[in-house]
Structure formats: structure tokens, C-alpha cells
Image (cartoon, grey):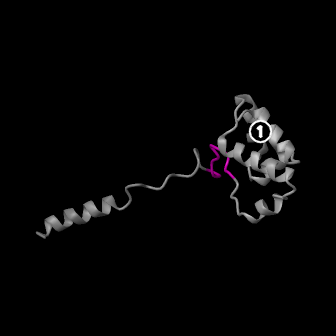
Amino acid sequence: MTYDEFQRHVGKAGLTLKDFAKLVRMNRVSISNLAKKGEVPSHLAVIACLMGEMAERGIDFRPLLAAIEIEPKKPRGAASKGHFGGSKQADLFAGREQRAASKTLGDQNGT
């Protein structure tokens, strides 16, 4: 969906882009930055389209969205305080060293 179509659906829902961002727990600047691309991700297009249709049919979608526990998106590249590059990824090979060490120990003991 083009950004212009997206704005039309958001307006049809009786919302500003700032209101839309609040409802879906996104940063309003992230929404505005989509204008540069000229396209809107499909998940946001679907949400805006449904909101516009619901508003047109007299269905108040605000309480429905308020009832959903939507976790706010973290800004990309957001580092936790005092750490360069954000939080460290969990070690995918955790425990491998312990298994290797116990295998070596077992070999030395003749088991």
C-alpha cells in the first residue's frame, strides 16, 4: 500500500498518524519515516484498512486495541545503558564447554 493510501485509511478511521502510532504502540517518527519510502509494510496497511472500515461502519476499535497487551517496539539499535551495541545475544552454544570438559575428564579416568 502506498503511504498516501495509508494516510487516507488512517484519516477515515478518524485518527492522526500520531494517534495511530499510539494505538499500535509504535514511535510516531517511525510511521512518518515511511513517507520517504512511499510504501507501508503490509501489516500496518492491514491495520489501517481495518480501522478505516470499522470506523465507517460505526464500530469503535479503540477499546478493542486497548484490551490487547501490545508491547511497544524497541527502537532499532537501542543499546541498554552502558553497553555498546545493545544487549548481548544469548550464547547459542552454552554448555558445550562443560560437556567437552567432562568428556575429557571421563577419558582421563578411563570411562
State which region is magenta: 73-82
- Measured as percent of width and height from the top left, residue 48 is found at 76, 46
Residue receiving disc 1? 6
Q: Main secondary structure of the magenta part?
A: loop
Q: Residue at x 58, y 45 (%)?
A: 84
How many C-alpha atoms fall within 10 Å of the one at disc 1: few (<14), some, or many (≥20)?
many
**Amino acid type, residue under disc 1 in the picture:** Phe
Judge whether 36 appears above or below 83 on screen: above
Does residue 54 sit above or below 40 in this rendering?
below
Residue drawn at point x = 86 percent, y = 47 percent: 15
Q: Quadrant of residue 105?
A: bottom left
Q: Quadrant of the C terminus?
A: bottom left
Extreme front residue here?
57
Judging from the image, what secondary structure is the residue with disc 1 in?
helix
Question: In the rendered view, would you say 76 is above or below 35?
Answer: below
**Where does the image place residue 64, in percent across and percent down from the top left?**
78, 62
Identify whether 66 is placed above or below 74: below
Residue 78 located within the stretch drawn in magenta: yes
Give the tally of numbered discs.
Answer: 1
Residue beneath the point at 64% across and 43% down: 76
**In the image: residue 74, left or right of residue 106:** right
- Tell me what residue is drawn at x 81 percent, y 53 percent: 54
Q: Nearer the viewer, residue 5 or 33?
A: 5
Residue found at the very far left of the displayed protein: 110
Left of 89 or right of it: where is 72? right
> In terms of image quadrants, where is residue 70?
bottom right
Q: Horizontal placement of 22 versus 42: left or right?
A: right
Of residue 65 and residue 58, the one placed in the foreground of this image is 58
**Is 67 one of the magenta-colored residues?**
no
Q: Percent position (x, y) of residue 3?
A: 75, 34
Q: Nearer the viewer, residue 28 or 87?
A: 28
